[in-house]
Image: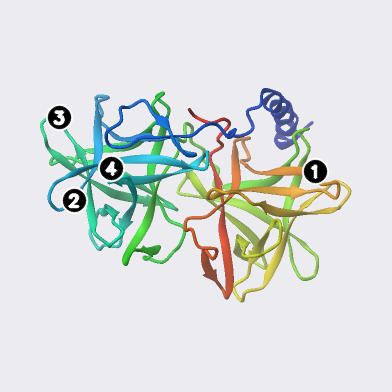
């Protein structure tokens, strides 16, 4: 009798073949579009961008504009942008005089976390949802589960409206706060400390009670390889995706070595492909490998990319690339990617090592949602 995972691998191989034949395994480099404050909802051609609207959704299905306001009350657009055509994690920006201002959650001791745009000179712009009668609703972070913080527009009666990114064609993404670090200060921009990034991310349309997911390398033919961490003695150790509080938007990738769970990161390197390693508490580096049925150990590397999302691949001796996925015990599937949140080469320091990018399991983007 086949195990559930074996049966799933057979089915998944068939699905992958169909997807590959259909050309839906990723976003093509399509012409990009942008929109200024004055242009209509239909987008116009520009360099490598497509603009999505940012809206608050009421329980009755109403849609409220989300805008940035300066200290004088002047209103500016807030939009979502992919980075170089990648839709795994879209940037949220306020647009002022043709310039994009970062939108972040600020460090605060308030019960609800302030969401603000930050100007080049450190000026703070309020983010508000605008009602038809002119009422301006605060937009705040209201609750954190794992790496994800809910973003809501809040009425005077404490009702909460979800915030979404909506494409001109009607595709919908969640707008969430995203934390990569345990520290209260995630980073600093233009002299302002911030608590979390604000991103547009694919919606999770189904829930899963599975908190620990397997990490596998998958060839388009349907072959599935275990992904393991190798300790100093050459032993194979589990690598898993961990869901915190059953939130599946952004799952941590951990190696379990010596009774400890160690973060898996992309390291700073000048190599053609980016090294992927588990990092010990004392800075020890552990290789991450995909294991073939014959026992061969294939390198797992990051494939360089112009945007903030980096492909993760197992590379065979012949140069074949195996995509790396997180698979739940019940057969659900997530992408495993490298994610950069800052433009600097060094994303962060971890136990004395320079980290190039985080590695997370995130919802799959099967085609450009345009």
Looking at the image, tell me whether mark 3 or mark 1 is earlier in sequence order: 3
For residue 255, which quarter of the picture? bottom right
Helix, strand or loop status at disc 3: loop
Asked whether, in this view, residue 89 is left or right of residue 101, the answer is right
Q: SS of the residue at dot 1?
A: loop
> Residue 268 at what x, y percent from top left?
62, 65
**Given this view, does label 2 or label 3 mark the residue nearer the observer?**
2
Q: CA distance from mark 2 to mark 1?
A: 52 Å
The crowding category of the residue bearing disc 3, from other C-alpha atoms within 10 Å (few below 14, some 14 to 19, many at least 20), is few
Q: Earlier in the sequence, mark 1 or mark 4?
A: 4
Q: 346 and 84: which one is in front?
A: 84
| Residue bearing the label numbered 4 | 152
- Mark-to-mark CA distance, 3 and 4: 18 Å
Cβ atoms at labels 3 and 1 below 8 Å apart: no
Q: Work out whether mark 3 precedes mark 4 in sequence or the reverse, and give the earlier one.
A: 3
Q: Is residue 255 left or right of residue 350?
A: right
What residue would you read off at disc 2?
Answer: 70
Coordinates of residue 133 in the picture (x, y in percent)? 10, 31
Label whose residue precedes the other's in the sequence (2 or 1): 2
Nearer to us in this view, 126 or 6: 126
* The quarter of the displayed image where residue 139 is located: top left
């Amino acid at each position: 009798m086949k195990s559930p995972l074996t049966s799933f691998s057979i089915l998944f191989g068939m699905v992958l073949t169909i997807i590959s034949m259909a050309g839906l395994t990723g976003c093509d480099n399509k012409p990009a579009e942008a929109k200024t404050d004055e242009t209509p909802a239909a987008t116009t051609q520009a360099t490598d961008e497509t603009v999505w609207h940012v809206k608050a959704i009421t329980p009755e299905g109403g849609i409220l504009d989300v805008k940035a306001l300066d200290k004088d009350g002047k209103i500016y657009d807030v939009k979502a942008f992919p980075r170089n055509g990648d839709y795994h994690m879209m940037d949220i920006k306020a647009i002022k005089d043709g310039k994009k201002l970062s939108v972040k959650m600020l460090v605060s001791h308030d019960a609800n976390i302030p969401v603000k745009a930050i100007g080049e000179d450190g000026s703070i712009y309020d983010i508000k949802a605008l009602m038809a009668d002119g009422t301006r609703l605060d937009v705040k972070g209201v609750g954190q589960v794992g790496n994800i913080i809910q973003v809501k527009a809040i009425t005077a009666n404490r009702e909460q409206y979800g915030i979404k990114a909506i494409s001109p064609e009607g595709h919908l993404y969640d707008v969430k706060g995203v934390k990569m670090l345990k520290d209260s200060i995630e980073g600093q921009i233009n002299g302002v400390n911030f608590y979390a990034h604000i991103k547009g991310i694919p919606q999770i349309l189904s829930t899963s009670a599975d908190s620990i997911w397997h990490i596998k390398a998958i060839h388009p033919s349907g072959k599935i390889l275990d992904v393991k961490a190798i300790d100093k003695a050459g032993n194979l150790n589990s690598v898993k995706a961990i869901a915190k509080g059953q939130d599946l938007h952004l799952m941590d990738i951990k190696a379990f070595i010596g009774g400890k769970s160690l973060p898996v990161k992309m390291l700073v390197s000048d190599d053609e492909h980016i090294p992927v390693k588990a990092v010990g508490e004392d800075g020890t580096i552990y290789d991450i490998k995909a294991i073939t049925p014959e026992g061969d150990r294939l390198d797992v590397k990051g494939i360089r990319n112009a945007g903030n999302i980096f492909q993760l691949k197992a590379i065979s001796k012949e140069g074949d690339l195996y995509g790396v996925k997180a698979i739940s015990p019940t057969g659900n599937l997530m992408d495993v990617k490298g994610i950069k949140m800052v433009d600097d080469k060094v994303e962060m320091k971890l136990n004395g090592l320079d980290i190039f990018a985080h590695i997370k399991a995130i919802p799959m983007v099967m085609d450009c949602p345009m």
